[in-house]
């Protein structure tokens, strides 16, 4: 016999099931996972290498919420107080991740739910994200025009490159770091970079609104040198731009693209299953082959020719500089204001 | 009858006034790089923005661009609007659709097309170089001129359609009467057509001015990183700097400048042409 209490609890359950949009889709580790990600090659590769081959067989349907990092970051911050967020997985760069993490917006990584966590390089692990792929900020130069390549960031200030150094506006934090390193600063002191940037400005450095616009300028040989991710350089080389790269003496700055599960994700188990799949060795190797980003797990093996183009040597890896995230975040407003008001002003 | 305006009013209240109140509240908060927003109740952001030469210059650039583009659009649009307004042909509806056609292409897509035209190795430079008209590529992209060209092309249909609708309603007999009394075509225009079409000119100019003040995509894509107008500067604070309080304060400053110029302009125009 069904008691009144049983009846009420059963109806309440049914009501809550009916009230939710996709009741059964939100069951553990199945159903729908919304992934906030970049579009373009990155989104396509996620779809081809992770969504379809790894998650579809588990009954997980992946929906991509495609946007650039800035809108995604803003969205995460805006909805962090909401009970139900719009993403189950959020892809961000390491610096952006740090900023959003300070607002306690992400779930802690649960090793029980990410079976491949032990394969992740320990130096890349963080409390609330898995590292997906990484690369380093290096000097790219046109091999036809630059016969004696620079060896350091400071070499970009050589007057013989007047008007030939191009920078991407969107990479203003890293352009500031580059100038700081050239001027004797370090990852916890960007201040010397400000004077150095003004010197670069008087050397007629060109600024382009996007990485793509910078690539077009490198292609048309309007500029010959730039500071850019090694992975981007790899892709541009593949696209036929005559480029080579130098790891500067002062050190290359690392960038890690990470993924996290927001605290208010509707399908957390599905989100963690997605993070686990992102660490799949085959998928990681394919990202290196297609986009030039280096795997973050120890068992992803790259073909030798690809490894040579996208990885850093042992010596260069030793000089790889990791951002001081706290300093970087706290200084961000000053970095942006200086870039906008002084350097570009 | 008053109930007829209710749906529109509710929509505006819910989706415009509500978020604006929220934004105003945000603009009074303080910014912290780690906590992002600290609850406060001060006008610091407004004071700082108003005193900052950087923002003063951006406001002046935005205002200058908006006034220049509105004036240019008016001069280019009026003859076209007169022609459309006076057209008595079965093709008239096609002409109106053709005027509207540029609005069917998104702002960003249109600007991307112009980028293909204007870049160093774009169509214009390649053609001129091949024809030996120039020896070095011209700097067409990332200049204020490119932005003016872009904005005027975007807002032109609004001005043409607004003015042509008013010109259509001016009886042609008035022009004939003026001619009959010996007025030249120019005098007829200045003394009859222009004053009678003044409501259209005012409405079109206000519409275009407001659109120009809020230009974002054209300014970013054709003006380049060094050219700053208010909308991209607001975006910078909100999205790149995560400084919502400052972004919100700048948005209200833009609103205040746009509204005061619109109101002042409308009053001045109404006095001059006795528009009712």
Image (cartoon, coloured by chain):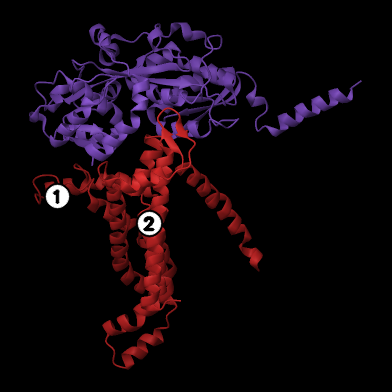
How far apart in space, not on screen, are marks 1 and 2 (Cα)? 42 Å
Image position of B230 with respect to A77: above or below: below
Q: Quadrant of residue B237?
A: top left
- The reply to whether callout 1 and callout 2 are in contact (CB within 8 Å) is no
Mark 2 Cα within 10 Å, few/some/many (few <14, many 20+)? few
Q: Which chain is purple?
A: A
Q: Chain of mark 2?
A: B
Q: Nearer the viewer, residue B128 or B75?
A: B75
Q: Is residue A333 visible?
A: yes
Q: Residue at x 24, y 47 (%)?
A: B117
* Secondary structure type for disc 1: helix
Q: Residue at x 34, y 19 (%)?
A: A324
Percent coordinates x, y for residue A1 in the rendering: 92, 20
Residue at numbered disc 1: B128
Residue at numbered disc 2: B257
Q: Is residue B115 left or right of residue B15?
A: left
Q: Which chain is red?
A: B
């Amino acid at each position: 016999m069904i008691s009144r209490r049983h009846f009420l609890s059963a109806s309440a359950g049914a009501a809550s099931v009916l009230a939710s949009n996709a009741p059964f889709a939100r069951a553990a580790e199945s159903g729908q996972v919304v992934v906030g990600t970049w579009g373009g090659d990155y989104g396509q590769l996620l779809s081809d290498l992770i969504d379809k081959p790894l998650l579809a067989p588990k009954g997980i349907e992946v929906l991509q919420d495609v946007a650039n990092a800035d809108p995604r970051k803003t969205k995460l911050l805006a909805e962090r107080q909401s009970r139900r967020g719009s993403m189950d997985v959020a892809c961000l760069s390491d610096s952006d991740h740090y900023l959003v993490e300070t607002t306690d917006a992400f779930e802690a990584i649960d090793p029980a739910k990410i079976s491949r966590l032990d394969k992740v390089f320990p130096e890349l692990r963080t409390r609330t994200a898995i590292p997906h792929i990484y690369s380093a900020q290096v000097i790219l130069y046109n091999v036809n025009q630059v016969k004696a390549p620079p060896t350091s960031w400071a070499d970009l200030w050589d007057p013989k490159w007047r008007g030939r150094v191009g920078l991407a506006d969107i990479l203003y934090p890293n352009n500031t770091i580059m100038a700081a390193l050239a001027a004797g600063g370090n990852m916890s002191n960007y201040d010397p970079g400000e004077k150095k940037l003004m010197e670069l400005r008087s050397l007629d450095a060109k600024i382009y609104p996007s990485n793509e616009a910078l690539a077009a300028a490198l292609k048309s040989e309007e500029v010959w040198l730039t500071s850019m991710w090694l992975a981007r350089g790899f892709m541009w080389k593949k696209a036929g731009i005559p480029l080579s790269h130098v790891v500067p003496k002062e050190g290359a700055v690392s960038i890690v693209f990470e993924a996290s599960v927001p605290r208010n994700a509707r399908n957390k188990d599905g989100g963690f299953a997605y993070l686990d799949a992102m660490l799949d060795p085959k998928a990681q190797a394919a990202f290196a082959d297609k986009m030039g980003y280096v795997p973050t797990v120890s068992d992803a093996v790259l073909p030798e020719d690809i490894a040579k183009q996208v990885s850093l040597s042992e010596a260069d890896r030793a000089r790889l500089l990791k951002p001081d995230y706290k300093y970087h975040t706290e200084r961000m407003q000053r970095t942006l204001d200086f870039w906008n008001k002084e350097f570009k002003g | 009858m008053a109930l007829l305006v209710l749906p529109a009013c509710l929509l505006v209240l819910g989706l415009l006034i509500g978020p604006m109140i929220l934004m105003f509240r945000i603009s009074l908060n303080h910014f912290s790089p780690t906590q992002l927003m600290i609850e406060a109740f001060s006008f610091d952001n407004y004071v700082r923005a108003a005193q900052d030469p950087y923002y003063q210059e951006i406001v002046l650039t935005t205002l200058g661009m908006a006034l220049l583009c509105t004036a240019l659009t008016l001069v280019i649009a009026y003859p076209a609007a007169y022609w459309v307004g006076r057209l008595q042909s079965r093709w008239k509806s096609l002409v109106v659709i053709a005027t509207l056609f540029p609005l069917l292409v998104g702002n960003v897509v249109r600007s991307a097309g112009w980028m293909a035209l204007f870049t160093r190795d774009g169509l214009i430079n390649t053609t001129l170089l091949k024809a030996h008209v120039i020896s070095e590529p011209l700097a067409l992209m990332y200049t204020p001129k490119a932005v003016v060209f872009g904005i005027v092309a975007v807002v032109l249909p609004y001005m043409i359609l607004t003015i042509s609708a008013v010109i259509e309603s001016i009886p042609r007999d008035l022009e004939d009467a003026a001619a009959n009394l010996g007025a030249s075509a120019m005098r007829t225009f200045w003394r009859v057509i222009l004053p009678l079409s003044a409501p259209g000119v005012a409405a079109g100019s206000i519409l275009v001015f407001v659109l120009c003040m809020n230009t974002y995509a054209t300014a970013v894509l054709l003006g380049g990183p060094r050219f700053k107008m208010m909308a991209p500067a607001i975006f910078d604070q909100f999205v790149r700097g995560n400084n919502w309080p400052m972004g919100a304060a700048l948005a209200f400053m833009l609103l205040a400048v746009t509204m005061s110029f619109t109101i002042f302009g409308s009053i001045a125009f109404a006095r001059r042409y006795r528009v009712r």
